[in-house]
Each structure stands twice: as structure tokens, then as C-alpha cells.
Amino acid sequence: MKYRITHTTKYNYSQPVGVCHNKIHLAARSLPQQTVTNFHLLIKPDAFASTCQKDYFGNRVDYFSIQEPHRSLTVTATSNVEVRPITRPPAFTASPPWEDVAQGIAKRRDELSLSAYQFSFASRIVPRDPAYAEYTLASFTKGRPIVEAGLDLTRRIFEDFKYDPRATTVSTPVDVVFKQRAGVCQDFAHLQIACLRSIGLASRYVSGYLRTLPPPGKERLIGNDQSHAWLSLYCGDEIGWVDFDPTNNMIPATDHITIGWGQDYSDLCPIQGVFIGGGKNRMDVSVDVATISSDA
């Protein structure tokens, strides 16, 4: 699948902003099954200075500063991305027992420090707790293949928790989501990561986009898509990392476009920064994930 993704964020301020400095995670990540053919960042008013670099996890991060008074700010990121099917999908029953993977992570911490071991700890947003471990072990029974168990946990979160945008905010703790059994994709990703880390497994937060299709007979609404979040589980040396989407009860494929990964959402916030002045402000976000032809 080939996509053109347009992510626009608009800020309007009641008073002038004298200066602002911003950090952006909006560029898709190049992967074996994902190729970024073009990325363009448009900032209005024009940035006084801008640069980009890779963060600790290898994700692209853009920085910019505006040093002139302004009452509005618009950031538009446009990406052309090709996503291909996984050449060798993980075999559910042929994957190793989950206990073997957990033991391997604990024993080989030096070799896996940059790829898996670091993702087995609690992080700023994602805790580890015996209550999460108890919930998880209903899926991760003794000797069960890790991919099969991961998919079962994904299914249970999908069935046990209600998708409700009004139930949480971006700062709602995982324990609140766990108790009220409701939230959005970010919450479900954090919850499943907390469950997996609580039994000694390595799991990372994945940020990206999901292609959505309109109901039969309806036209696709431009700009009505949203950012999406899911997670990856380390399934041993041979298989590596496998993605799971608890919001949709599936293993992501060509409808998912990856921006990057980290310990949790705080490592991949789309736009964050500081500004001086501004008074009251309003933010509006528009995301459009459109398929494009092969010659586009």
C-alpha cells in the first residue's frame, strides 16, 4: 500500500507569542517493510531556525524555533510512505514458550540492552504491578507460545475494555484505565505494555497512523483520520519484535504506518515545546491518510 499522510496542527492564541521552541515526532520511520519516499514539514510563520536528528531510539525528531511575535502557528507534515506485507508472518504456535523469552531477557541483559532489555522496566507512564501480572497470566499460561499468548491478551483487552474518547485524557494514568475498563488506543497500548512488562517481558510503545475506511455508501472524509498507537512484544531471537493492536484486536499489517517507538507516549509526543506569552490558546488537529497510485 502507498499512502500520502497529511498531519496538520493549528494553534491560535488570544495574545501574541513572542518566542517558541518546538520538538516534533511526525516523520514515519524507515523499516524493512516500510519505505518513506518523501517527507516535508511546512511551518507558518516561517521558522527562525530548524534542524532534525535521530533520537535515542532511532526515530527522526524535528526541532524549530520562531522568534517573532505571532498569534497563530500551523505545522503541516506531509509524508509519502509505502507499506509492504510482512514476508514471513510469525507462527502463533511455533513461537517459543513465553517463559523462555522472559528468562533470556533477564540473563542476556548486556547483549539485548539496546533492543529488548530496556523495554522490560517500568517507565514514566507505564508502571509494573502484580495486578497487571495477574490479569496477564490468564493468557500467558505455562508453556504457551509467546505469539499465541500475546494475541490472546490482545483479544481480551479488546473485549474487556470499551473504546470511549470521553473516558480519558492524554494524562490519564494506566491504573485508572485498568479500573474503569475504558479509554482510547493510547490507553490500551500502555495497558498491554504494563501487563507484559509486569511478567518480565519486553514491550515498546509504537506511534503511527491507521488507514480507516468509510462505511459502505459513504465518501471518505478528508482530514478525519487520527493518530494511532499500538505496541510491540519481543518474542525471542528468531522471531524478534511482533506488533499487536489491542484497539482493533489484530496484528498490524499494511493498514498501519509506523512513526516510531519508545518506552511510552512521552517519547513520541507529536508536538511539544515551550512558548512565551500567548494568553489562552486553542489547538486543532487534522489527519488525513490517503492511498495514492503507484506513479504518484
Image: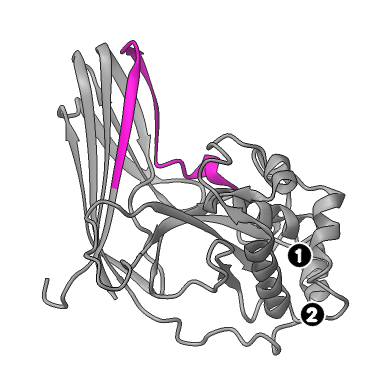
- Give the residue type that dot 2 points to: Pro
Badge 2 is on which residue? 97
x, y percent for residue 194:
71, 52
Tell me which corner region of the image, top left, top right, bottom left or bottom right, holds residue 176.
top right
Residue most extreme to the front: 217
Q: Which residue shows up at 64% across the image and 40% down it?
A: 125
Instruction: Name the image quarter holding the C terminus.
Output: bottom left
Determine which quarter of the picture holds residue 286: top left
Crowd tier of the residue under label 2, counting other residues whose Cα lies within 10 Å: few below 14, some 14–19, many 20 or above? many
What residue do we see at 57% from left, 39% from top? 168
**Residue 23 sits above or below residue 31 on the image:** above
Query: From what the image shows, is residue 18 above or below residue 183?
Result: above
Q: Is residue 5 magenta?
A: no
How many badges with numbers are in the image? 2
Residue 1 at x, y percent in the picture? 29, 76
Q: Which mark is residue 152?
A: none
Residue of label 1: 105
Q: Is residue 259 visible?
A: no
* N-terminal label among 2 and 1: 2
Q: Is 255 left or right of 36, judged from the image as shown?
A: right
Amino acid type shown at disc 1: Ile
Tell me the magenta residue range: 264-286
Which label sits in the foreground, 2 or 1?
Answer: 2
Q: CA distance from mark 2 to mark 1?
A: 13 Å
Residue 10 placed where, x, y %?
A: 26, 33
In the image, 105 versus 277, the foreground residue is 277
Residue at x-position 81% and y-position 60%: 135
Residue 53, horizontal then vertical, whole percent: 36, 44
Packing grade of label 1 (10 A; few <14, some 14-19, many >=20) is: many
The quadrant where residue 72 appears: top left
